[in-house]
Image (spheres, helix red, strand yellow):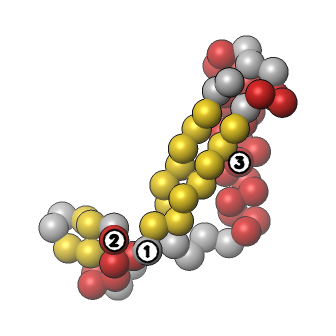
Amino acid sequence: MPFAQIYLMEGRTEEQKRAVIERVTAARVEAVGAPIVNVRVWIQDVPKENWGIAGVSAKDLGR
């Protein structure tokens, strides 16, 4: 069962997450020939204060 774990900085819309799920699923099906019903995608929203960029949190950077 192909499993994709995706980390995104919080703030994406439900529509954007749906698009990620659809496209990652399609890529897994194409890349490894897995039946679409076996593909799992997990999106984890990460709070901006927990996402570091160049030693500074994304929240402090105003992202």
Position of residue 18 relative to residue 45, above or below, is: above
Which residue is drawn at the image coordinates 33% and 71% (left, top)? Answer: 50
Residue situated furthest front in the rendering: 1
Q: Residues within 10 Å of mark 3 (few under 14, many from 20)?
A: some
**Badge number at residue 47:** 1
Going by the numbered disc 2, the residue's amino acid type is: Asn
Mark 3 or mark 2: which comes first in sequence?
A: 3
Disc 3: which residue: 21
> Label 1 neighbourhood size at 10 Å, few (<14), some (14-19), many (20+)?
some
Residue 62 place in picture, x, y as percent: 35, 84
The three-letter amino acid code for the residue at tag 1 is Pro
Q: Are marks 3 and 2 in contact (CB under 8 Å)?
A: no
Which residue in the protein does label 2 denote?
A: 50
Mark 1 to mark 3: distance in Å?
20 Å
Distance between the alpha carbons at the discs numbered 2 and 1: 5 Å
| Three-letter code, disc 3 | Ile
**Residue 21: x percent and y percent?**
71, 48
Please tell me how crowded label 2 is: few (under 14), some (14-19), or many (20+) other residues with Cα within 10 Å: few
Task: Please state which of the two labelled residues, at mark 3 or mark 2, is closer to the viewer.
Answer: 2
How far, Cα to Cα, is label 3 from label 2? 23 Å
Position of the C terminus, as image quadrant, is bottom left
The number of numbered badges drawn on the structure is: 3
CB under 8 Å between callouts 2 and 1? yes
